[in-house]
Amino acid sequence: MAELVYRIGVGVVGLTVFAVGVVAIPYPGPGWAIVFVGLGILATEFEWARRLLAYAKERYDKVMAWFSDQHIAVQAIGVLFTFLVVVGTLWLLGAVDWTAELFGIDWPWLNSPIGLGA
């Protein structure tokens, strides 16, 4: 029984860390590292997680190697796309409007279109 409770605990903690990492991927910082830590936690108890962790690390290394071999224009487009994803999600979450208000800027188009952060 204790082993089952332990496995469930590892599953809950691992999936939570993994989910936080997935959400953090487009933001500056350790998004992918958090994903790998979550998978590492899960891999301590689950074979499917060990296989997924090995596959994900291999694919990540290949994609990063490919990206670093690309022309500077392709890399710039990748950076721009990442920037747009970050700013877009921060806008949706109301963080852009909140930050603007700290500096005395009150432009209606900065408000979240889904009403968050209002």
Image (tube, grey):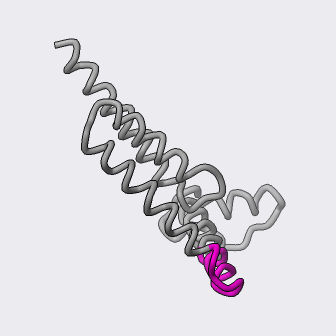
Residue 7 location, x and y as percent? Answer: 26, 25
Q: Quadrant of the C terminus?
A: bottom right
Image side of residue 115 versus residue 107, left or right: left
Picture quarter containing residue 90?
bottom right
Can you say whether 23 is above or below 96 in the image? above
Residue 9 location, x and y as percent? Answer: 31, 25
Q: Which residues are magenta?
A: 68-81
Q: For the point 34% across and 37% down, which residue is it?
A: 43
Can you say whether 50 is above or below 87 in the image? above
Image side of residue 15 versus residue 90, left or right: left
Residue 108 location, x and y as percent? Answer: 66, 73
Depth check: give the residue in front, 22 or 116. Answer: 22
Q: How many marks?
A: 0
Image side of residue 76 versus residue 40, left or right: right
Picture quarter containing residue 70?
bottom right
Can you say whether 78 is above or below 96 in the image? below
Depth check: give the residue in front, 42 or 112. Answer: 42
